[in-house]
Image: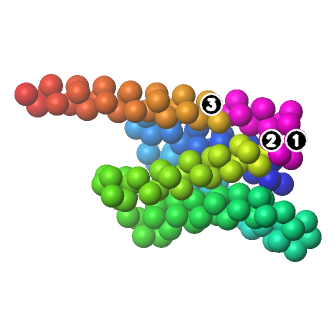
Amino acid sequence: MFIISGFIFFVSMIGAILLMANNKMKTVRIFGVILAVLMLPIIVVLINYIVIVIDIRFVIFSILILIYLMAEFLLDRVFKFDFRSKPSTHVPYIIIEWAAAFSFLFGTIRLDATIGWIIAIFFWTFIVALIYYVIKRRKNEAITASAID
């Protein structure tokens, strides 16, 4: 369940970032729903590793992932708070996001090395998508700024 959740997480994150880069904000909401629903299997994994397996690493991985998924859900869906516009609120969010991404990466590698490396490809694709998004956003800001002048 953890491995499948990792695939869903990275595919959703990559899809959302690429859509945001191309200003398809209404479609991005679909991935927000997917990430919210992803909390359910992670809760099951967390309970499993607390009650049955007793593996502290996966308890920590699951908690970090849940913190990110809950923050994403609460800030974007419930409170509709624009936390991305201020560094004071965006930086902690980014730290939690990366903690979740690394938790999925390292957790999957610990469970199955082969599938872990496949997840690593998704992880690196996630990074490439973020770079693409930042470059495209800066380019659009430069075009907007030059059009105003």
Instruction: Label the magenta part by its dominant secondary structure.
Output: helix
Q: Secondary structure at mark 1?
A: loop
User: Looking at the image, is mark 2 or mark 3 nearer the viewer?
Assistant: 2
What's under tag 3, amino acid-wise?
A: Trp
* Residue labelled with disc 2: 109
Which residue lies at the image location 65% right of the left edge and 42% below the top edge?
10
Dots 1 and 2: beta carbons under 8 Å?
Answer: yes
Q: Secondary structure at mark 2?
A: helix
- Magenta stretch: give its range: 109-122
What is the C-alpha distance between the residues marked 1 and 2? 5 Å
* Residue labelled with disc 3: 124
Decide: few, some or many residues near mark 2? Use Cα within 10 Å; few <14, some 14-19, many ≥20. Answer: some
Dots 2 and 3: beta carbons under 8 Å?
Answer: no
User: Does residue 43 sit above or below 104 in this rendering?
Assistant: below
Does 117 appear in magenta?
yes
Point out the tag, 1 or 3, that comes first from the N-terminus. Answer: 1
Point out the tag, 2 or 3, that comes first from the N-terminus. Answer: 2
**Which residue occupies the extreme left position in the image?**
149
Asked whether residue 129 is in view, the answer is yes
- Where residue 141 appears, as percent x and y from the top left, is 25, 32
Does 96 appear in magenta?
no
